[in-house]
Amino acid sequence: MTDQFAGVMNEVFRQLGTPTRGGIVCIVDHASNHIPDDIDLGIPAHLFGEHMAFDIGTEAIAEILARDHEIPAHIAAVSRLVCDLNREEEAAGLVPETSDGHRIPGNAGADREARLTRFHRPYHTALAQWLAVAEPALILSLHSFTPQLATSDERRPWEVGVLYNSDDRAANIAMPLLAEAGLHVGDNLPYSGRHLNYTMNRHAEAFGRPYLGIEIRQDLAATPLDHVRWARLLAGVAQRVALEAM
C-alpha cells in the first residue's frame, strides 16, 4: 500500500480504493507511460510524453475519483507501447511496431507471448477477480484523445466522447447529462466502441454489467484543476447513470 486509499500495486496495474458491492468502479487501460527498465523500445524519450504512449490526464482523474469520490480504480501501470491492454490477444497492435507515424524498433520481433504473459494476462486476470468481488452497478472506463490526429490538420470538435458496443444503456443516459453540462459530446466518437472495446467487451458486456466508456479531449485535461473538474463531473454523471441503468 502507498497510502490510506491504495490497494494492490505491481508493475502491471494499481488498484486504488476498496470497491463497495453494488457501487461504481473505474478502469483506466492506458493510464501510464511507464516503460520497464529491461525493455528498450528504441524511440526518443520525448515520445513517452505523447499520446502514443498513454492517455494523458486519465491517471490523475482516476486517482481523484478514488480519493475524493469513493470510486475505486483499476489503473494500468505500463505503457501501451509495451503492451496494449485494451486489445485482443491476437490483435496486431497489441505490441505495436508503429504508432502515430513513428516506428518502434524495439517491438520488431519482440516476444509477443512473453509480453502477454508478463503484462496482458495478469492485468485482465486481476481485473476479473476485482470485478467479481465488487459486483459493480456501473463500470466507468476512462480514456482520452488528441485534439487532432497527427496526420491531419482538422480539429476534433468533441470535448468528450461516449463509447459503447452492443450495450448502450449507460451511454444513452450519460450523453444528455454531459450535454446539459455544456459539453460537445461525441456519440461513439472520436472512436467507435463497436470496433475498439476489448476491455469492456470482456469484463462488462460479457457479464451484462452496465458500463460508461468515456473519452476526454486531452487539451481539456491538461492541468490539476482540469483533473479535479473532470473527476467531479464524471462522479456526478456516473452516480446518476448507475441509479437509472439498474
Image: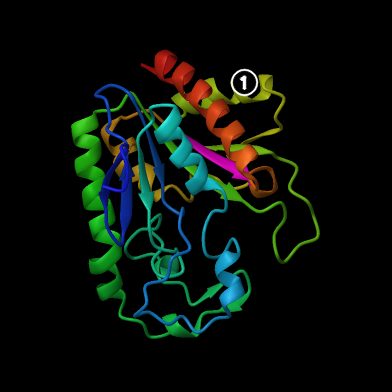
Q: Residue furthest front?
A: 3
Q: Looking at the picture, which amino acid does disc 1 mark?
A: Pro
| Closer to the camera in the image, 67 or 204 | 67
Determine which quarter of the picture holds residue 102. bottom right
Dot 1, crowdedness within 10 Å: few (<14), some or many (≥20)? some
Question: Is 170 placed above or below 54 here?
Answer: above
Residue 203 visible in the current orientation: yes
Name the residue at 41% across, 14% down.
Answer: 243
**Is residue 214 located in the magenta-colored stretch of the structure?**
yes
Horizontal side, residue 235 vs residue 17: left or right: right
Q: Residue 96, position in %: x, y?
A: 46, 72
Does the rendering let one see residue 166? no
Q: Position of residue 157 (x, y in %)?
A: 75, 42
Residue 45 in the figure: left or right of residue 20: right
Indicate whether residue 243 is drawn in magenta. Answer: no
Q: Is residue 99 above or below residue 40?
A: above
Q: Residue at x 51, y 45 (%)?
A: 60
In this view, 144 is above or below 183? below
* Secondary structure at numbered mark 1: helix
Q: Quadrant of the C terminus?
A: top left
Residue found at x 47% / y 51%: 196
Main SS, magenta region, reads strand
Left or right of 216: which side holds 114?
left
- Which region is colored magenta? 212-217
> Can you name the residue that lies furthest to the top here?
244
Q: How is the image coloured?
A: rainbow
Q: Residue at x 30, y 30 (%)?
A: 208
Work out whether 103 lies above or below 184: below
Q: Nearer the viewer, residue 236 or 208?
A: 236
Residue at label 1? 176
Picture mark count: 1
Residue 142 x/y as whole percent? 48, 42
